[in-house]
Image (cartoon, grey):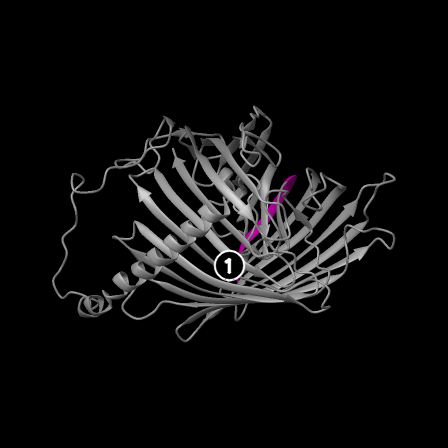
């Protein structure tokens, strides 16, 4: 298998270089055609527009369909609802080979199916229900091919992975504010829902809870301020290897828009369970600033976790610093990026889904998992006492239907105990029709004082 992988890597390396040379040759052409035309462009007629790609099931008004909006049903509150049911989802299937050096190699075929039913009332009110029938937690349906044979396991878990109701009081009760002059821009969501804050570094988990959001708060010097309070009572994952382990999650999340930047300040308190295996309480706080500096998009984040469990081992004190920058080279739609991180002590996320991987996924494709099977990240996404960076280039071509990402990354450890590592990775994505995507990922890594690593996977993604 290793010889085969070496040959494949050589092929993809040559293909990547050839692609860059060929596509890079279009820079002059792009420069000649980058100016806006002085000729007016007429409006397209409905017959000239691309055909709509509908979801799997549509009952009621079409999803993003043309034409007039239906009259709807007027409620006693004054709200007008136009009920619709849209069923959509995705199916992923992949062949994967993974060997990060320190870990045992694996060869597998894995599958994932996600189905959602969206009961639409208005653009702000809906009920969303989702299931993932081909997986049981982090175990995905498919076959283990590592032993030369094929040991297959098929999961038919119909547990609900997502179910929540969301809306806005001002839209549900418009008669209370016919002039839209009162502070009724208060949204809510109740049920099992995804919490994703600080780009998943602080919080990336599906939690049972209720959230309330006050939007459109205008203060001097501020364009807009949004504040969200959240109370979670179940389905809280403290560690990738631990199911639950907490009874309550309290969160306060803010987003402030200034004229030249967006600032987020988020805080959570996770209360541990009271049983004998309790892992204690954890307080997390995170701040970020996103802005454009000249020709560069930049973001700076700092997240800190504080544990209140002297005897515990699952939650600890630590700080994670993160910086990212990207730019679009002249006369192109491409993206060049450089991201870096620094972890001091042992930072712990407030809650993290077992299939979400570690908090360093934002650094680059070499640090991110794929969310399917046992194929891990090329470089460890554990931030404990470590530092690292990723330099990459994302190339778009073939009328934006194909993209290639080439990335070089590395990481080291402050304490000098864990070995340093570096890797080169690529990701090729190509659209097949309107609903299908082919994705090929590969990497080769060098690990200090350990065997080198390599990985290769091919995935088909179907959206419906």
In which quadrant is the C terminus drawn? top left
Residue closest to the eye, 304 or 136: 136
Q: Residues within 10 Å of mark 1 (few under 14, many from 20)?
A: many
Q: Is residue 174 visible?
A: no
Residue at coordinates 64% horizontally, 52% vertically from top-left?
Answer: 102
In the image, the segment drawn in magenta is 207-218
User: Which secondary structure type mostly characterizes the magenta part of the structure?
Assistant: strand
For numbered disc 1, what is the local secondary structure? Answer: loop
Q: Is residue 356 visible?
A: yes
Q: Position of residue 58 (x, y in %)?
A: 37, 27
Residue closest to the eye, 349 or 68: 349
* Residue 148 location, quadrant: top right
Left or right of 257 in this view: 278: right
Residue under circle 1? Answer: 364
* Residue 57 location, quadrant: top left
Residue at coordinates 33% horizontally, 47% vertically from top-left?
Answer: 430
Left or right of 185 in this view: 284: right
Residue closest to the eye, 366 or 48: 366
**On screen, residue 36 above or below 205:** below
Q: Position of residue 384 (x, y in %)?
A: 70, 61
- Residue at the front extreme of this rendering: 3
């Amino acid at each position: 298998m290793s010889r085969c992988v070496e040959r494949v890597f050589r092929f993809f390396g040559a293909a990547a270089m050839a692609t860059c040379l060929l596509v890079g040759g279009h820079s002059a052409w792009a420069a000649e055609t980058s100016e806006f035309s002085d000729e007016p462009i007429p409006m397209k007629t409905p017959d000239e527009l691309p055909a709509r790609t509908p979801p799997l099931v549509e009952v009621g008004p079409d999803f993003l369909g043309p034409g007039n909006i239906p009259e709807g049903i007027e409620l006693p509150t004054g709200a007008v609802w136009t009920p619709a049911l849209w069923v959509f989802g995705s199916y992923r299937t992949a062949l994967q080979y993974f060997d990060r050096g320190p870990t045992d190699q694996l060869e597998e075929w894995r599958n994932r199916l996600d189905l959602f039913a969206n009961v639409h009332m208005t653009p702000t009110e809906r009920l969303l229900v989702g299931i993932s029938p081909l997986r049981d937690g982090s175990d995905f349906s498919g076959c283990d091919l590592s032993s030369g044979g094929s040991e297959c396991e098929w999961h038919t878990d119909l547990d609900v992975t997502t179910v929540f109701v969301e809306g806005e009081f001002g839209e549900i009760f418009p008669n209370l504010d016919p002039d839209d002059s009162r502070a009724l821009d208060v949204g809510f969501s109740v049920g099992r829902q995804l919490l994703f804050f600080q780009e998943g570094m602080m919080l990336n988990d599906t939690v049972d809870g209720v959230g309330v959001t006050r939007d459109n708060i205008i203060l001097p010097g501020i364009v807009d301020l949004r504040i969200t309070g959240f109370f979670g009572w179940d389905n809280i994952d403290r560690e990738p290897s631990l199911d639950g382990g907490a009874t309550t999650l309290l969160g306060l999340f803010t987003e402030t828009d200034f004229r030249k930047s967006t600032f987020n300040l988020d805080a959570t308190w996770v209360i541990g369970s009271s049983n004998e295996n309790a892992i204690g309480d954890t307080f997390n706080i995170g701040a970020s600033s996103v802005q454009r500096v000249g020709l560069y998009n930049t973001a700076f984040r700092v997240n800190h976790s504080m544990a209140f469990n002297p005897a515990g081992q699952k939650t600890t004190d630590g700080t994670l610093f993160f910086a990212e920058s990207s730019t679009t080279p002249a006369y192109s739609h491409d993206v060049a990026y450089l991201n870096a991180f620094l972890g001091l002590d042992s930072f712990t996320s407030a809650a993290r889904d077992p299939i979400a991987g570690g908090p360093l996924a934002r650094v680059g494709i070499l640090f991110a998992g794929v969310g399917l099977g046992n194929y891990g990240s090329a470089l460890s996404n554990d931030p404990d006492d470590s530092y690292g960076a990723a330099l990459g280039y994302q190339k778009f071509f073939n009328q934006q239907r194909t993209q290639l990402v080439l990335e070089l990354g590395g990481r080291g450890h402050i304490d000098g105990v864990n070995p340093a590592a570096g890797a080169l990775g690529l990701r090729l994505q190509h659209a097949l029709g309107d609903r299908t995507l082919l994705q090929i990922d590969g990497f080769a890594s060098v690990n200090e004082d350990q065997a080198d690593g390599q990985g290769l996977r091919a995935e088909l993604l179907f959206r419906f």
